[in-house]
Amino acid sequence: MLNNACKYTPPGERILLSARRHQDKIILRVTNYGVVIPANELPRIFDKFYRVPSTDSWKQGGTGLGLALVQKRVGRLGGTIEVESGEGKTCFTIKLPIKI
């Protein structure tokens, strides 16, 4: 996720990383500013080989597997991943259970 944030955040914009504990979960967030994923594309971004059309202004390429792999790994760890995009930013939130 951080790799995608670096790849798609325009020069001069920022990326915020956060991690916190909330009850029995660890919550990780990656928020990048200056890029928005269109609402009609959000349901597909975790599909294998899917790339949002025309968001790669710098032609960095990629296979479209990164987010699918992250989602699969998070699921295997018993967690969830969500994305929100709008108002000039995109935020991915991962919630992982704390297992003692």
Image: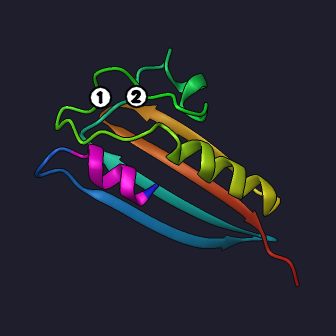
Residues tagged 1 and 2 counted as in contact (Cβ below 8 A): yes
Residue 37 is labelled as 2
91 w.r.t. 98: above or below: above
Q: Is residue 49 left or right of residue 25?
A: left
71 w.r.t. 19: above or below: above
Residue 89 is labelled as none
Q: Nearer the viewer, residue 19 or 81?
A: 81
Q: Which residue is mark 1?
A: 55
Per the image, is 5 magenta? yes
Q: Nearer the viewer, residue 22 or 48?
A: 48
Name the magenta segment's main secondary structure: helix
Looking at the rendering, the stretch of residues picked out in magenta corresponds to: 2-9
Please provide percent x and percent y for residue 6.
Answer: 29, 55
The part of the image, by quadrant, that contains residue 22 is: bottom right
At horizontal 67% and vertical 74% (from top left) the residue drawn is: 21
Please provide percent x and percent y for residue 38.
Answer: 41, 21
Please provide percent x and percent y for residue 44.
Answer: 58, 24
Q: The residue under label 1 is which amino acid type?
A: Thr
At horizontal 63% and vertical 64% (from top left) the residue drawn is: 27
Q: The residue under label 2 is which amino acid type?
A: Ile
Per the image, is 6 magenta? yes
Q: Is residue 24 left or right of residue 38?
A: right
Q: Quadrant of the C terminus?
A: bottom right
Please provide percent x and percent y for residue 37.
Answer: 40, 28
The part of the image, by quadrant, that contains residue 10 is: top left
